[in-house]
Image (cartoon, helix red, strand yellow):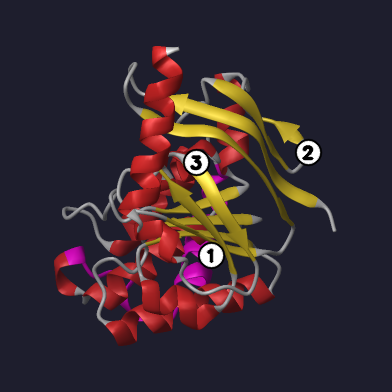
Amino acid sequence: MAKEIIFDHVNKWYGEDCIALENVSFSIEKGEFVFVIGKSGAGKSTLLKMLSRQISPDSGKIWIQGEEISSMPKSRIPALRRKIGQMQPEYGLLAHKNIYENIELTMCATEQPRRLFERRIRQTLRTVGVEHRMWAFPDEISEGEAARVLLARALVVNPKILVADEPTANLDSDSAYDLMRLLEELNRMGVTIMVGSHDRELVSIMRKRVMTLSAGRLVADERHAVYNSMAADWMEERRIKNERAKKQRI
């Protein structure tokens, strides 16, 4: 199968003592469903944001669908982001705009033709089951509905790759499971899915490919896997940090 995403010895640091990613290499084939797990600060969000060039690596290279994006000029970034749907709860819905208007902003940001707006927004909301809430405001919908709207916002660009960072963080178990099943259905339709998650139960139930980060290193990459205990292993994290400290002293 074709390689949809390639990370080749990617590094990212925030200041001298904060390593977000260290020598991370992997490839993801078209149509895969991959979980990225790890403790807070392990590098999950940094890795996921690199896919849409919200963050650039300090060294190493990244390819998306055969195009090297690490040094991509800014003028090409809107075209890249039309390939990648981004479900990021940290960038929530704007309270003063209704659901239609919130999703419309994404279509504007990715420079899509205005004539497509209403048809595409309706279609996407229908796909995730909340078309009837199109004119509601964020404070008028449930947490589960809000998660589906955030998914619709990611899908409105008709992406080949969907990136979801902690998409179930604020959901009860039933809503979280329903959302994962929606993602699984999109995956069956051919969308490559990458999900950053802390949810041990959901990751284990889904039995997808699981990549585990610890202190910025990729320490495990398993297929049809459950939640890897190394994701929360503070001893592994300490071992990596001690190893780095020794290298700095040499």
Q: How many marks?
A: 3
Q: CA distance from mark 1 to mark 2?
A: 31 Å
Mark 3 or mark 1: whose residue is earlier in sequence: 1
Where does residue 240 sit, x and y in percent of width and height? 42, 38
Magenta highlight on residue 100: no
Residue at the extreme top: 250
Is residue 11 shown above or below 137? above
Q: Residue at x 41, y 58 (%)?
A: 231
Mark 3 nearby-residue class (10 Å; few <14, some 14–19, many ≥20): many
Q: Which residue is mark 3?
A: 217
Identity, as a three-letter code, of the amino acid under mark 3: Arg
Please state which amino acid type lies under the numbered disc 2.
Answer: Gly
Identify residue for label 2.
66
Q: Which residues are drawn in magenta?
A: 112-138
Q: Secondary structure at mark 1?
A: helix
Q: Nearer the viewer, residue 21 or 114?
A: 21
Q: Are marks 1 and 2 in contact (CB under 8 Å)?
A: no
Q: Which residue is mark 1?
A: 119
> Which of label 3 and label 1 is nearer to you?
3
Q: Is residue 193 left or right of residue 151?
A: right
Mark 1 or mark 2: whose residue is earlier in sequence: 2
- Whether residues under marks 3 and 1 lie with C-beta atoms below 8 angstroms apart, the answer is no
Instruction: Tell me the SS state at disc 3.
Output: strand
Q: Position of residue 155 (x, y in %)?
A: 52, 60
